Amino acid sequence: MQDRRLPLGSLLLGLACFFLPFITVKCNDKPLMSITTFDYAIGNKPKMGEAAESLEKLSNSLDDLKNLGSSSESESDSDSDSESSAESEPAKDDKLSDAMEGKMNPLLVFSLIAALIGVYFSYEFLKMGSEPAAKFGSWAAGCAALGLIAARLILDSEMGNTGSETMGIISVEYGAGFYLPLIAFAGGAYLLYKHWNQAKSIAIEATSENLPTAGESPVESV
């Protein structure tokens, strides 16, 4: 009975970790924005960090420089060149905010729903110890883990992140809200799969014990 509690506990832990940071964006090692897995799933806005204020001040300063240099055409051209070079690195953050802000992430919603289904079947397996509950719970937990992996791969592609998690002065870090649910869901899927195989073996043994061996005839009831 105690082993049956492990898959349920693992999946519940993974769901709790949805409220931890999924991704954190940093500018010169200072937090620019972060968002939890749950907020990212349902489309809430990311939480802005201290570096966001610095970037806003930088943008205002660049606007002031542009206005001061507007009196001379040559100065205006040079200022626009310096502005574009200064803004080239922070502007990369636009891809991140566009990818993260204000829209629901269907893959993370899928992962959340699959995890909830896995919790239901894990609870049924805890009570009954049935083979179908372990089977469907294992599938659901595995789908929850795959949903997290797919969400990360798509986010990386939207940011133009090809293998490296650093883009100039903008760095991207995946947090506990990604890794812990992934480990918990994968662990829950493995444990339920293991119980599923054990339940199948027990069912096969019970069936074989009830069958007559070769050369024997079933005992007729008198």
Image (cartoon, rainbow, N blue to C red):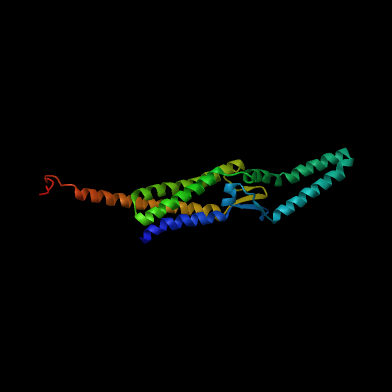
Q: In front: 176, or 205? A: 205
Which residue is found at the position 28% from the left and 52% from the top?
202
Who is closer to the viewer here, 167 or 137? 137
Left or right side of 44 for 53:
right
Q: In this view, does 63 lie to the left or right of 164?
A: right
Using the rendered image of the protein, determine whether residue 162 is visible from the camera's viewpoint: no
**Position above or below: 160 against 174:** above
Provide residue 23's location: percent of width, then percent of height. Answer: 59, 51
Residue 60 image point, x, y percent: 79, 49
| Identity of the residue furthest to the top in this view | 73
Residue at the location (35% across, 53% down)? 195
- Could you tell me how many numbered marks the image carries? 0
Q: Give the residue at the far left of this rendering.
A: 222
Q: Is residue 190 left or right of residue 59?
A: left
Can residue 97 be seen in this snapshot?
yes
Q: In this view, does 77 lie above or below 140?
A: above
The image position of residue 22, as x and y in percent, is 57, 52
